[in-house]
Amino acid sequence: MSARITAAAPGNAPTSGTATRSGPVTSRQRRAGLSAGLSLLVMAVLAGWANLAVLEALVVPDDATRTIQQLIEAGWRFPAAVAAMGVVVVLDVVVAWQLWIFFAPVDARMAALAGWLRAIYAVVFAVAIAELMPAVRAIGALDGTAGRTPDAAGAAAVMAHLDAFHTLWSRGLALFGLHLALLGLLAWRSRVPRWISVLLGVAGAGYLIDGLGALLSGNYALDLGRFTFVGEVVLLGWLIVTGLRREPRPTPAPQPTQPRQGRVDPPATATAADRRRGARPAP
């Protein structure tokens, strides 16, 4: 038995969904999907720049002196990258909420679970970012010195904070992977194309393996998420396109037509005068 996807607030959504893939995307879902897609797009830009262009480009594992020197020379980029990741945390919560609204008509409980997993992951990510704040302050203090050369203890402390950030973030990816896996299941049962739902499942599996690997082994370095992230990127594009698409205007119902009244011929028994007047003869 199937039911069409209908607009529903998350609190009033059905506890389980059997929405057909042919059901329409409602205006509420369209707005939520557009908000989630645009937020994911901003997140991709900020996180990509902060992680790839700053942290991974400047942090050299097992070389504290060179790492700190490069962070000092980077100037404003290191604290700006930390601030950008803080914005990503806020947007993660927004995306969790909007995707909950979008998928609640499919399965309210699963959509809520997926949203909570992403929200908890955002908290873990925020705790990881907090580990970078002492490193930002230490680099800022070194930037004002004449030689700008840290001592061994200061360099070791900065590297410890950088390592703690990476460790916490890597372990939190297990929650993010579960979130994407549930999104893949919800997408499979919704209007989202099934090839996108498959990519979401693959992305979730990659992040889940990375998170569990970092949790179980301190030497884990496979980093599958670098290659399986495509599913979320494709989803954000589909959400934006769907949200910007014009809703079809409802076709007005045809007005009922009144039956035309035909001419009533006078009975044969009428007189000629009656027939000329079009009236019935008197009884």
Image: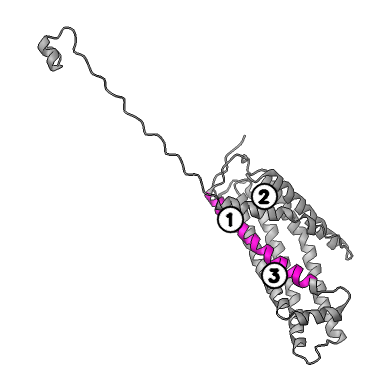
Q: Which span of residues is magenta-colored?
A: 27-56
- Return the disc, 3 or 1, that comes first in the chain's sequence: 1
Q: Residue at x 60, y 56 (%)?
A: 98
Secondary element type, mark 3? helix
Crowding at label 3, few (<14), some or many (≥20) Cα neighbours within 10 Å? Answer: many
Q: Locate residue 8 relative to residue 148 in the image: left or right.
A: left
In the rendered structure, which amino acid carries the disc numbered 2?
A: Met
Please rate how many residues cluster around mark 2, counting C-alpha atoms within 10 Å: few if below 14, some from 14 to 19, many from 20.
many
The residue shown at (10%, 12%) is 273
Disc 2 to disc 1, C-alpha distance? 21 Å
Task: Find numbered disc 2 in the image and state the secondary structure of the residue it sits on.
Answer: helix
Residue 271 locus on image (x, y percent): 12, 9
Magenta span: chief secondary structure: helix
| In this view, 210 is above or below 185 | below
Measuring from the top left, give residue 255's x and y in whole percent: 37, 34
Quick one: label 2 or label 1, which is nearer the N terminus? 1
Q: Are marks 3 and 2 in contact (CB under 8 Å)?
A: no
**Drawn side of residue 12 relative to residue 199, left or right:** left
- Which residue is farthest left? 273
> Label for residue 34?
1
Amino acid type at mark 1: Leu
46, 175: nearer the viewer: 46
The single residue placed furthest to the top in the displayed view is: 269
- Residue under label 2: 110
- How far apart are labels 3 and 2 at the CA level? 27 Å
Residue for badge 3:
85
